[in-house]
Image (cartoon, rainbow, N blue to C red):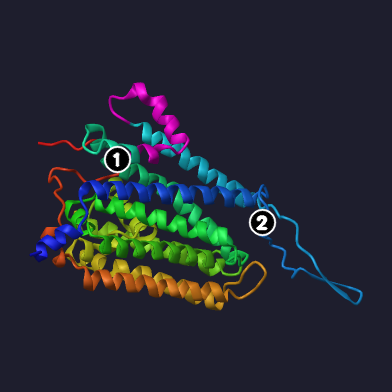
Amino acid sequence: MLTMEGFVQKRVPSPYKRLVLDRLLTVFLNYTDLITDILVMLQYGCFLQHTLSTNCTTGIENVGNVTTSWIPTCEPHWWWFGLSLSILVVSTVAHAFVYTIRPGQNQKFCCFCCLGIFQLTYLRDLWLAVLYPTTAEAEEEKHSTVGRDFTVKILECTPQLYLQTFVLFSIQAHGDRLKVVSTLLSAASLALGLVKFMAAQSVYQQNFLQTFARKLTVGLFLTTDQLLRASAYSLMLSEVARPLGIPIILLFPVLSLIICYKALGRSGFGGFCLAFSVGVLAGHILPLFSLTSTLGDSTDFRGPAWWQEIYFYLALPLRYIEMTFCGVVGLTVAKTTCGHVPVIEMITFFSLMVGNLVFFIAMFFCMSKTQVNPTDELQAKPDSPPMTLVGANSVPQGN
């Protein structure tokens, strides 16, 4: 007879299967995102034909009494092409640099550098996971891959997501399937990197994110959050809305920075950097620390208790207040390049906000930390340190 404990254990895949499936998903998302980003970049420079145009004519001409239609020629957008190429180059060089930082393996520097430059590192990670899941090298890769992939996500997926969302909004190119797919892939790839990075921070968070339902819910929350924020900034940076939009964009990160600096209670430059990471990055690029009450919090707060209360109860609402301000400006002020009201864009924006709230409510009420089943826990080593960007390639040391 199958007991509940046996059913749960049977339902949860083995560590080997989880590792292989995780690497397969990483390979798929990263390469499809990279390919679509390159194709979109080539369209910006008219190396591939596209219909993106800042010309606001309708494509219909009246010649005498005869109405004719015409197809506009490909219009190059060199600023967008240059930004996209710069993002790709910087992220590739950073990827290669981070991948080559390996203690005691200087003789393989050129090999690892080439793997990073040609974006072959994900295939090597998959190869190690499939063929050598228990070797010392594979164990090292399991810890270094998370920080390395996270670095690439911040340097490549995030700016590409914001750039492509701005292009979609400014010229109302929501009908261009390639650009929409590329934007969605960038958001999904970034969310995957954030989920893996969050799981590496502590044993509890790793246990919490073991089941597929929790990973999917947190991943969808982060994906909608990235799309929501990118859409909001696109609205705020439209030419008509910039006088109001830029102050709003700057105001809320400053508020988050002040709250986190006071709650952390760390003085000096180190405290400022930590507050910037927790308040600005975590609150506005990766909203992980806003989920402290749901996913557990490992941040060492030393500030006054009332500042800590403000952090715990205001950090997340502050994000939604910011998005509400952006939505109001979008409805009343924002216009596209051709002066049109962004109707479809605003519907998408508020749909993303509602979806993001739904996923957060699902995590808060249905997946609270008190409901983590002990049978779902991973056999993680208690002496494994949390993953950081600085020590992304260090090997965990036992006692």
Please name whichever residue, 382 or 216, is drawn nearer the observer in this view of the structure. 216
Magenta stretch in the rendered image: 102-125
SS for dot 1: helix
Q: Position of residue 22 (x, y in %)?
A: 31, 50
Is 103 inside the magenta-drawn segment? yes
Residue name at image x 48 percent, y 67 percent: 232
Please name whichever residue, 307 or 340, is drawn nearer the observer in this view of the structure. 340
Q: Mark 2 or 1 closer to N-term?
A: 2
SS for dot 2: loop
Q: Position of residue 170 (x, y in %)?
A: 60, 64
The residue labelled by disc 2 is 50
Please name whichever residue, 246 or 336, is drawn nearer the observer in this view of the structure. 336
The answer to whether any part of residue 373 appears in the image is: no
Q: Position of residue 34 (x, y in %)?
A: 49, 47
Please name whichever residue, 399 or 115, is drawn nearer the observer in this view of the structure. 115
Looking at the image, residue 137 sits to the left or right of residue 97; the answer is left
